[in-house]
Image (cartoon, helix red, strand yellow):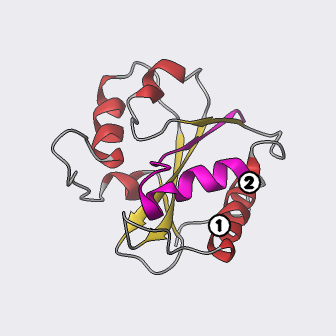
Amino acid sequence: MNCLIIFLGNTLAGDDSAGYEVYMKLKNTVKEARMEYLGTDFFKFYGIYEGEEKLIIVDAVYGSDDIVHFINEDIFLIEDKSEGAHFLAAIEALKILKVVMEKFPKEVHLIGIPAKSFEEVTYDKKIIDEATEKIKEILEGKSSSG
C-alpha cells in the first residue's frame, strides 16, 4: 500500500513545532512511505498528493496530555476550528479537501502530539519518540486508534 506522511507545524511557535521535530527524526529512516513537511498550510496537500492509499497526518494538538491517534471517519467528527484570523485548522482543511479532491486516500490517520504553548516548547524527547513509534506501528499495520 502506498503511504504519504504529512507533518504540520510552525517551527517558530513553541509546541506547534512538534510535527517538524518528528519529521526531522524520521526523514532519513522511513523507507516505506513518502514524507512531506507542509508547515502550517494543509492545502499544500492538494498539490503534492500522488494517489497514495494511506495518509498519515502528524500535528500538534492542544487539549491532550498524551499522543492521540484517530483513524478515518473519527477524524472527520473532530470539531477543530482555527483560532487565528488567517489560517484554517488542519481538520477544517482536510474536510474541505475530502469533498473537492477527485481522488482521496482510502485510509487516513491523524497522530496528535500534545501541545500546551505557542510561546515555548514544553514537549520532551520522550513524546517525540512515542509519536515516531506510533507512525512505525501504523506503517507495519499494527496500530488502532486511541
Q: Which residues are magenta?
A: 1-25
Which residue is found at the position 29% from the left and 57% from the top?
77
**In which quadrant will I find the N terminus?**
top right
Which residue is found at the position 67% from the left and 64% from the top?
134
Of callouts 2 and 1, the N-terminal one? 2
**Residue 73 rendering spot, x and y as whole percentages:** 39, 52
**Is residue 8 shown in magenta?**
yes
User: According to the image, label 2 marks what residue?
Assistant: 25
Give the Cα separation between the discs numbered 2 and 1: 8 Å
On the picture, is 92 further left or further right than 36?
left
Q: Nearer the viewer, residue 81 or 70?
A: 81
Query: Residue 18 is drawn in which quadrant?
Result: bottom right
> Element under label 2?
helix
Q: Nearer the viewer, residue 6 or 106?
A: 6
On the picture, is 35 further left or further right than 104?
right
| Image marks 2 and 1: residues in contact by CB distance under 8 Å | yes
User: According to the image, label 1 marks what residue?
Assistant: 128
